[in-house]
Image (cartoon, rainbow, N blue to C red):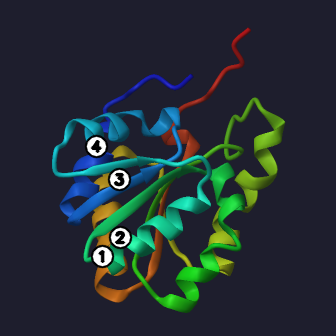
Amino acid sequence: MTMQTDWQNEVYPALKSTGIKHLAYVPDAGHTAAIQQAHADEDIQPIVLTTEEEGIGYLAGAWLGGNRGALLMQSSGVGNCINTLALQSCARFPLLMVITMRGDWAEFNQWQNPMGQATEDALKLMGVMTWRADRPEDIGKLIRGAGTMAFDGDCACAVILGQQLIGEKKWVD
């Protein structure tokens, strides 16, 4: 389990500064602070998803309804979204994603490695622009910049929070 650290408190304020009103997510320890902050904020509608690709359709609907939103997920969820990313590619609505990495560095769970190693390439193949944060001081500016490109350019953008930023995970018995 990841312990909450200061870098986690950079994510939500940066997302909110982009003007989002909806935050769709699959629960993830790396996104704990952002999820808790969204639930405490009366101006934001947090939406718990059963699977990551639901978030893409939900955010398309939010945009059609005049609202901005963002999707939080783990790298393993990117594999679930590949087909649904075609919706954004064809319809050209803004899609802002923040992705915590697994299978990237010091991964204890071998089942996370294949998708972790393919995450950024898979996103790029589907037309998603990506930026990677491996240092806490980069998180806010990368999210704000990706938000500008997504919402002002009707693009799909993802900020990837590297596993070195998150920290080494240990198997717990």
> What amino acid is at disc 3?
Ile
The reply to whether residue 126 is visible in this rendering is: yes
Disc 2: which residue: 62
Disc 1: which residue: 65
> What amino acid is at disc 2?
Ala
| Helix, strand or loop status at disc 2 | helix
Q: Residues within 10 Å of mark 1 (few under 14, many from 20)?
A: few
Disc 3: which residue: 139
Q: Are marks 4 and 1 in contact (CB under 8 Å)?
A: no
Which quadrant would the N terminus be assigned to in this image? top right
| Label 2 to label 1: alpha-carbon separation | 5 Å
| Label 4 to label 3: alpha-carbon separation | 17 Å
| Label 4 to label 1: alpha-carbon separation | 20 Å
Whichever of callouts 4 and 1 sits on the residue coming sooner in the sequence is 4
Whichever of callouts 4 and 2 sits on the residue coming sooner in the sequence is 4
Q: Give the vertical position of 63 relative to 113 (above or below).
A: below
Q: Are marks 2 and 1 in contact (CB under 8 Å)?
A: yes
Q: Residues within 10 Å of mark 3 (few under 14, many from 20)?
A: many
Which mark's residue is nearer the viewer, 4 or 1? 1
Q: Give the vertical position of 21 relative to 168 (above or below).
A: below
Whichever of callouts 3 and 2 sits on the residue coming sooner in the sequence is 2
Determine the residue positioned at 63% across, 81% down.
86
Residue 112 rendering spot, x and y as whole percentages: 76, 43
> What amino acid is at disc 4?
Ala
Determine the residue positioned at 38% across, 61% down.
70
Disc 4: which residue: 38
Whichever of callouts 4 and 3 sits on the residue coming sooner in the sequence is 4
